[in-house]
Amino acid sequence: MSLTKGSEQKLSRRDFFRKTAVYSAGAIAAANVLSPVKLKADDPAIVNEAEWGTKLGDLVTKNLYGVPSPYEHNVIRRTTDLLSSGDMYASVSMCPIHELQGIITPNGLFFTRNHGGTAHVDPKEFRLMIHGKVKREVVLTLDELKKYPSESRIHFIECPANGSTGWRGPQFNNLQFMKGMMSSAEWTGVMLKTVLEDIGLEDDAVWMLAEGSDNAGNPRTIPVEKALDDAMLVWAQNGEALRPEQGYPLRLLVPGWEGNLNTKWLKRLEFSDKPWHAKEETSKYTMLQKNGKAIRYFWPNEVNSVITSPCPEKPWTHLKKGDMIEIEGLAWSGHGTIKNVDISFDGGDNWVEANLKGLVLPKSWTRFSYIMKWEGKPLLLSSRAVDDTGNVQPTIDQETSAVGVESVYHRNAIVTWEVSEKGEVNNVHIRKHNA
Amino acid sequence: MSLTKGSEQKLSRRDFFRKTAVYSAGAIAAANVLSPVKLKADDPAIVNEAEWGTKLGDLVTKNLYGVPSPYEHNVIRRTTDLLSSGDMYASVSMCPIHELQGIITPNGLFFTRNHGGTAHVDPKEFRLMIHGKVKREVVLTLDELKKYPSESRIHFIECPANGSTGWRGPQFNNLQFMKGMMSSAEWTGVMLKTVLEDIGLEDDAVWMLAEGSDNAGNPRTIPVEKALDDAMLVWAQNGEALRPEQGYPLRLLVPGWEGNLNTKWLKRLEFSDKPWHAKEETSKYTMLQKNGKAIRYFWPNEVNSVITSPCPEKPWTHLKKGDMIEIEGLAWSGHGTIKNVDISFDGGDNWVEANLKGLVLPKSWTRFSYIMKWEGKPLLLSSRAVDDTGNVQPTIDQETSAVGVESVYHRNAIVTWEVSEKGEVNNVHIRKHNA
């Protein structure tokens, strides 16, 4: 392919004040975006009254709990038996992140990962037991737990297997399947620290086991240090009670750490001076290295990013040469706050700095943006995120060189879209993988 | 009633750094919240395995667009013919704000106000015409509009008739009906300023008319100054496409201003040097004064607040004497950012400062909190918000004295809950109104 460097006109700018401003730079210049558009005075859609303007609409009583427009019926979670057990009970549904805007995922589209299906817990029968190396063992009802002061925070949750097919075939050519095992929400609950300070930890309580009440249980060991840092017991997501598939009525939230640790349908927290070496942290959810050894207890989702527009499902085939267009994407890091995101048009040889837009919060999705003029020339579009702990997203070669290709988890290599002259978008890794 | 002053122990504190911190003070002390609770070793709900732990749950394919737990079936929007036309097409559904957490309202619970029912717009047939005193008149498809760079911002929308029954009878004794004509979301779209700078405004374009394509149309006049300030053309709400009842596929967002101005199913924007004096800004949506004259073009929802926990639907009847408990509520202002909220336990004679918690954003719901010890003594619980433009929420007497009781709109008087010795909660205004 031939790429003319310098063909991209940089119109966005970094707002150095974004950490203090409520919202980051909104002053994105958009000169002449619509230059070719004029008043189409004879457009039937504007000349004729719309059918829906000639009659009464639905009563407010039609949906006391609302639903999306029927025209959006394709914006749904999707699954594949490639990533599921044979019976589909240990399965995952991917979030349509190519269709999302902002940093909130509506609850109906939040990705789901189950090890034994979605449990339906009766909140009256719910109990949380906290025991082991604590000063006061307790069994709490939901009402008792909700007497604690609540906090609300926006965080992403990402399955560490997100992008797992990137390590080795088969490759997806579809953003929803490549990176849709994550979503973001405003969570409400009590800081776990508040509860643990109330009941008291023994001095040698160093590890915490979290276990769910569903048939899989999904026990996982978590260091007390994280429990006392920013972990939460959450009962609400985006303002309402958790959905059943997110652990109704209570889940553990360990911001920025492997989705699997955010135990759903939470039943008990046990404290000990030793880790548990549970199934889901020994036979699974480890980092297999190229020497055949596995790293265990590797928790944070590392710094990552992906361009969501364009992407294979959202190509630029509707653009004309000379159109101004916004490249947009998501960046996130389980280590902290996104500091900056760079964009390359030539597959990583040259980089320009993108604009971070909207709220820039710790362990939260952060939107980035870059406005360019589309000249109809082929591009290799990549994004590379950096977080405030100094972590930089690696290239595929760097990641492969460091840890091989035997792992399933913690893929955060740079994703590159191959944009054709016609504006078609494909995952370049497919061609590289097959070459 | 007898109120013992000083019976409330203030444990919360104001974080003076909250404007610079990502989240406001989370350090809410919660000492001994659970003092009475112990390990109930024989609790059947913890001793016996739960029924849902003994079998497989639902497949992820069951709901590719998720729904709430059946146990939450009472958390819905509600309507009343008191606030509707006879045929119920001009009606409103109230948001269950007593059940909400944080500052995001899930789209399924976002309040709805329709003048002619909910229109179902075909996005392919959608057009937005911008005409009148502009340099370049345009008719845009949705795809053309979405080529502009997008922004995402969290804002509330409030119907100016929210709390309308507060002016004069009948009074509600229910938070959902008293204040549920508002909700909050993360909105995504293009700043109207970006579009207007692109097509150009004539020098004498001082007013903008916004009109919807539904049968009601709901034309309203808005000053160009607001259009160029923070108004947006939004196509997404909490990450997904607008719901039909919120104006799918495009609505106008005028942050902080009367809900009625946030035109749904948007069809056209016209610019002129004169206002239009449309029906919905002359016969309705005006402020009738006690002298019989009405104030027109009164747009911002003024500084306001209400305690959401406790409230009539969320009483303290489950508390025991000596329990620590968090008072929580919502504050908002169409003029700007909430600066502080005070709480009174004696109906307004004495005030203490509440803690603002979570994100504190302009023209957005802001959560406030105050932790106290419940001594089982009767209280008159009130909240009073102040915004960063210096506006202070008035008392009922102040508001009545200023504008009488003939208005329907812009009620922002302080709400007081009467808390009985048993923890029952009632709207004190009912007793005052009937006295």
Image: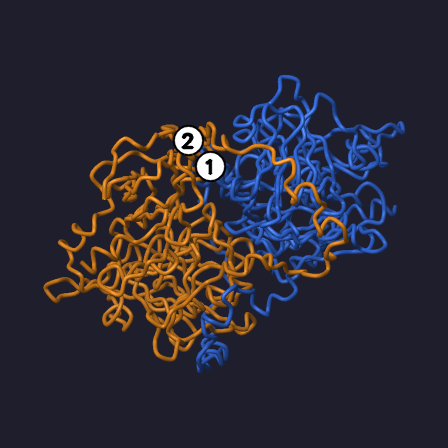
Chain colours: A blue, B orange
B125 on left or right of B344: right
- Residue A164 appears in the figure: yes
Residue B20 numbered mark, or none: 2
Give the chain letter at badge 1. A
Name the one closer to the observer, A276 or A7.
A276
Amino acid type, mark 1: Pro
How far across and down, in percent of the image, does residue A417 sit?
71, 48
Chain assignment, label 2: B
- Looking at the image, which residue is at 53% across and 39% down? A145
User: Would residue B273 be found to the left or right of residue A339 on screen?
Assistant: left
CA neighbours of label 1 inside 10 A, class few (<14), some (14 to 19), many (20+): many
- Amino acid type assigned to the residue bearing label 2 in the image: Thr
In the image, residue B396 sits, relative to residue A280, either above or below, namely below
Q: Nearer the viewer, mark 1 or mark 2?
A: 1
* Residue B351: image tag: none
Per the image, the residue denoted by label 1 is: A149
State the SS at label 2. loop
Percent coordinates x, y for residue A84 in the rendering: 81, 51
